[in-house]
């Protein structure tokens, strides 16, 4: 694989903080790199250094001749007077781009709901973000760097972007870097991870799930006691291994490695115990929607919604932007009145809402954080342990030195942490999370998920973050054509619906849907065929084990190699790429055989 760009001995510091010190790294053809780390540790700065928009105090970034880099920053530079069409396509004639399938797919994937002639200046922030992303993607680039591209994209938009990136370049060509808190996207697209922390960048092979596994293994080796080994990352790995259907088909050597690490980790939550606690706090009636509908003038947003929300229910609500998710939450919370049907709430229901507008903080912007905490309850119990509000806030990643800051002076991420704390301390028994991943990093999301695992109440989540949705909820519903539809197949079923693979089911409301009938060709594998496939699968596992050993040897050679010998490192990296390509091909064969064995 060809070398595209490299950073050597970079140093960058601001008046109060060193961001990077003696940083050396490189990007090769075929790299798909996800960048993670705490807010403020330098993820966006790293993209700016590599893209050339930020100049280091020392060191240099070198590029292959004629390298084309496309960089999506968090703030766009669109001309507000331009039309959407001009902002995206520039001076390209319509017939030119309309005849290009790649460009049409970008427009359909990101801008289908926008008027092509609308001025950029009248668009919302999320719409401008999509226009800017489309503008970048229509260009021809050797390297694309995206800073939080999934913000303001709904779940099917994120799925489209993942598919686009995976198919954009021929195999082992082009390079992609992304900063995002969307862990599903990282796992779906990236083949390497960079963790930014403590002025350095630590590389990991594989996507987000592999990164979690390697982090756990690193901590396990370094841990002096069992208490150090049992950490949040192992709990998240347990969910990745046990709970997510899309991740269960893994080669045996990977399953064994994961099982050894999580052998003593209990299930992430006890649903029966939580439900019993929820019933004790809520009673049997929470919120019942009976043939409820909401119309705004001539536009009917929700229709014939029947849903009995149970104590301890943990539900995710999916739907396109504008489908009516916020209206449904308003019906449940009481901020929206139905124009048809009715809504009944239990007498003991207390609803807490984590919204996108920081509404809990509007009246206390001039107060200091320490003063706000002094007015709350004195302790909060998690997994049998009591925390003071300040301790819980620190657990959420809020630095103690900011306790004296005024609420209005906090960053978006710090406000989100404080907002969540105040919602939890208000002791609701029904918790509504409306896009809770905005302004937070992956580490905080892990902590939030851990807190919610032991929260004994009804939980309703609206989010485009697929990872969070699958992690904290036990079932999902979708709003499709104004109807509320249960999704037994989860997010995958929803994506099939919006892709038009089940047009009949889209128009069927939840109250009148009938069980699906699985089709079968009546065939099956004979005993001899099963034996042959099982034998082939075992052979593939042995080959994968051997490739893994060779890959580990190459990694060890690279770690001990002279870092100034770029040619030697390039040869080792090329060999590593060949081994990974072989492993990928064998894994696909193994998965195909496994699926045949499971279906027979």
Image: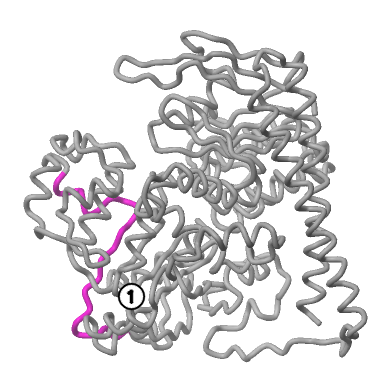
Residue at the spot 22% in from the left edge and 70% down from the top edge: 428
Q: Is residue 490 above or below residue 44?
A: below
Q: Regarding mark 1 in the picture, which secondary structure is present there?
A: strand
Q: Is residue 295 above or below residue 581?
A: below
Instruction: Answer yes or no: is residue 152 visible.
Output: no
Question: Is 85 in front, or is 29?
Answer: 29
| Residue 104 place in picture, x, y as percent | 76, 46
Residue at the spot 62% in from the left edge and 34% down from the top edge: 177
Q: Quadrant of the C terminus?
A: bottom right
Relative horizontal placement of residue 283, taking residue 439 as reference (left or right)? left
Colour treatment of the image: one colour
Q: Residue 499's quadrant in the figure?
A: bottom right
**Stretch of the chain drawn in magenta:** 343-364
| Residue 230 place in picture, x, y as percent | 40, 56
Q: Is residue 80 above or below residue 600?
A: above
Q: Is residue 287 above or below residue 58?
A: below
Residue at the spot 76% in from the left edge and 77% down from the top edge: 598
Residue 361 painted magenta: yes
| Residue 13 place in picture, x, y as percent | 39, 15
The residue that mark 1 highlights is: 458
Residue at the spot 19% in from the left edge and 82% down from the top edge: 348
Q: Alpha-carbon neighbours of circle 1 within 10 Å: few (<14), some, or many (≥20)?
A: many
The number of discs equals 1
Q: Quadrant of the N terminus?
A: top right
User: Residue most toward the top?
Assistant: 58
User: Residue most toward the front?
Assistant: 224
Relative horizontal placement of residue 347, taking residue 256 as reference (left or right)? left
Residue 94 painted magenta: no
Relative horizontal placement of residue 506, taking residue 313 as reference (left or right)? right
Question: Is 101 in front, or is 466?
Answer: 466
Instruction: Answer yes or no: is residue 184 visible.
Output: yes
């Amino acid at each position: 694989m060809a070398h595209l760009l490299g950073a050597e001995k970079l140093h960058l510091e601001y008046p109060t903080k060193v961001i990077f010190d003696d940083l050396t790294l490189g990007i090769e053809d075929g790299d798909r790199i996800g960048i993670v780390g705490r807010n403020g540790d330098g993820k966006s700065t790293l993209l700016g250094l590599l893209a050339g928009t930020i100049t280091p105090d020392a060191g240099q970034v070198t590029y292959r001749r004629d390298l084309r880099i496309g960089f999506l920053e968090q703030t766009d530079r669109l001309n507000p007077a331009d039309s959407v069409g001009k902002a995206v396509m520039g001076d390209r004639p319509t017939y030119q781009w309309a005849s290009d399938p790649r460009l049409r797919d970008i427009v359909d994937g990101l801008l289908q709901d926008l008027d092509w002639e609308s001025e950029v200046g009248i668009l919302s922030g999320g719409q401008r973000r999509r226009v800017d992303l489309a503008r970048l993607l229509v260009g021809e680039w050797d390297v694309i760097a995206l800073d939080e591209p999934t913000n303001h994209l709904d779940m099917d938009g994120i799925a489209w972007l993942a598919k686009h990136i995976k198919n954009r370049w021929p195999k082992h060509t082009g390079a992609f870097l992304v900063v995002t808190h969307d862990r599903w996207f990282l796992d779906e697209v990236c083949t390497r991870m960079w963790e930014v922390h403590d002025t350095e960048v630590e590389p990991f092979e594989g996507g987000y799930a592999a990164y979690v596994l390697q982090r756990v293994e690193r901590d396990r080796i370094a841990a002096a006691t069992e208490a150090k080994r049992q950490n949040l990352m192992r709990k998240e790995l347990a969910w990745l291994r046990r709970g997510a259907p899309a991740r269960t088909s893994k080669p045996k050597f990977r399953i064994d490695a994961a099982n050894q690490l999580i052998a003593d980790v209990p299930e992430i939550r006890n649903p029966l115990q939580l439900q019993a606690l929820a019933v004790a706090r809520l009673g049997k009636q929470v919120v019942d929607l009976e043939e409820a509908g909401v119309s705004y003038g001539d536009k009917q947003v929700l229709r014939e919604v029947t849903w009995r929300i149970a104590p301890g229910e943990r539900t995710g609500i999916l739907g396109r932007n504008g489908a009516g998710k916020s209206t449904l939450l308003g019906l449940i919370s009481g901020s929206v009145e139905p124009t048809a049907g009715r809504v009944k709430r239990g007498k003991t229901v207390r609803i807490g809402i984590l919204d996108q507008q920081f509404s809990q903080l509007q009246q206390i912007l001039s107060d200091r954080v320490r003063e706000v905490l002094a007015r709350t309850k004195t302790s909060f119990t998690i997994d049998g342990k009591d925390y003071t509000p300040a301790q819980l806030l620190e657990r959420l990643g809020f630095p103690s030195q900011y306790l004296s800051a005024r609420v209005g002076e906090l960053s978006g991420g710090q406000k989100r942490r404080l907002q969540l704390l105040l919602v939890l301390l208000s002791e609701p028994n029904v918790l509504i999370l409306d896009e809770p991943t905005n302004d937070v990093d992956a580490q905080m999301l892990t902590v939030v998920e851990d807190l919610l695992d032991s929260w004994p109440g009804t939980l309703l989540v609206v989010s485009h973050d697929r990872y969070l949705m699958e992690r904290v909820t036990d079932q999902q519903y979708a709003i499709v054509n104004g109807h509320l539809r249960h999704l037994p197949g989860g997010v995958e079923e929803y994506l099939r619906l919006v892709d038009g693979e089940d047009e009949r089911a889209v128009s069927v409301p939840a109250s009148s849907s009938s069980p699906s009938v699985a089709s079968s060709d009546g065939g099956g594998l004979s005993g001899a065929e099963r034996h042959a496939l099982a034998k082939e699968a075992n052979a593939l596992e042995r080959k994968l084990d051997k490739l893994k050993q060779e890959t580990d040897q190459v990694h060890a050679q690279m770690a001990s190699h002279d870092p100034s010998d770029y040619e030697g490192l390039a040869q080792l990296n090329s060999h590593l790429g060949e081994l990974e390509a072989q492993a990928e091909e064998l894994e696909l064969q193994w998965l195909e055989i496994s699926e045949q064995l499971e279906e027979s």
